Image (cartoon, rainbow, N blue to C red):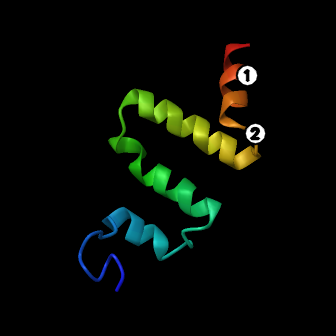
Amino acid sequence: MTIQDIGFYEKPEDVQAVLKVYPVTSKLFSLALIKIRYDKMDKASQIRAEKTMLAMSDGRSWDDKSRSETS
């Protein structure tokens, strides 16, 4: 019996939609999910999301991105 069988967890609609296009283990899945949720985020969360997407796309750590913006 899985967690979904007992009704403990159901995937949100946005996750289900992205799963139709990308596997959950894909970097593209994470990027797509962030983009879908972006407009619902507050400003601070949007800034973190942008840094995360940049870090994921070029392989640098999130902290490296933070330092490069202040330099």
Q: Determine the secondary structure under disc 1.
A: helix
* Screen quadrant of the N terminus: bottom left
Q: Is residue 24 above or below residue 66?
A: below
Q: Residue sitting at 36 percent across and 38 percent down?
A: 41
Labelled disc at residue 60: 2
Q: Is residue 33 left or right of residue 39?
A: right
Q: CA distance from mark 1 to mark 2?
A: 11 Å
Q: Position of residue 36 (x, y in %)?
A: 42, 54
Crowd around label 1: few <14 · some 14–19 · many ≥20 (10 Å): few
Which amino acid is tagged 1?
Ser
Q: Position of residue 44 (x, y in %)?
A: 43, 27
Q: Quadrant of residue 2?
A: bottom left
Q: Determine the secondary structure under disc 2.
A: loop
Q: Position of residue 30 (x, y in %)?
A: 55, 57
Q: Is residue 22 above or below residue 33?
A: below
Task: Residue under label 1, please give it.
Answer: 68
Q: Is residue 25 left or right of residue 6?
A: right
